[in-house]
Image (tube, rainbow, N blue to C red):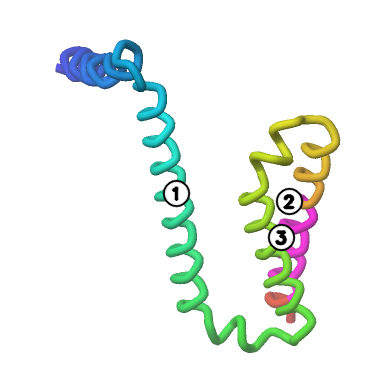
Amino acid sequence: MAVLRTIRNVAIIALLAVPVAFVPGGGNVASAVLVTLGMAFLASLAVAGRQIYRENRLTFDSLPDDQRAVLFGAVGVIVLMIAGAGKLLGGGGLGAVIWVTLMACAVIAIVGVWMRAHSY
């Protein structure tokens, strides 16, 4: 039964790949589909972030001003790095090093705020 399901799934993928490979302009359609999927993914991340903020509003409001600024600044850096990933990572080299460094610093800042918020 599992083998038939696998064969069916492979056939569906192959059927979806035929227009991309053989229809003129299929690559453009594939690019549009990938952009649409990427936008949907980023929108779902935004909705999840909004939900987390709404569920923990009291926690965010009870943070000292400096920690809240660091937290929101780090989240802003992550958003900017996601938005600029194509430019920074596309060329490789220094751009990729800067991208990884800023992402690591933002994550470290978020972890630091979280650890201070949960210390007694």
Disc 1 crowd, CA 10 A, few/some/many (<14, 14-19, 20+): few
In the rendered structure, the answer to whether residue 56 lies left or right of residue 22 reads right
> For this view, does 38 lie left or right of residue 86?
left
Which residue is the site of mark 3?
77
Q: Where does residue 116 sit, x and y in percent of width and height?
A: 75, 74
Residue carrying label 2: 103
Which one is earlier in the sequence, the residue at label 1 or at label 2? 1
Q: Which residue is mark 1?
A: 39
Report the Cα–Cα distance between label 3 and label 2: 7 Å
Instruction: Identify the residue at horizontal 48%, vertical 57% (top origin).
Output: 45
Label disc, if present, on residue 118 of the rendered structure: none
Q: Which residue is situated farthest in the front direction here?
A: 24
Q: Is residue 112 left or right of residue 86?
A: right
- The amino acid at mark 2 is Met
Q: Nearer the viewer, residue 118 or 39?
A: 39
Task: Please tell me whether residue 30 is drawn above or below residue 100 in the rendered image.
Answer: above
Q: Quadrant of the C terminus?
A: bottom right
Tag count in the figure?
Answer: 3
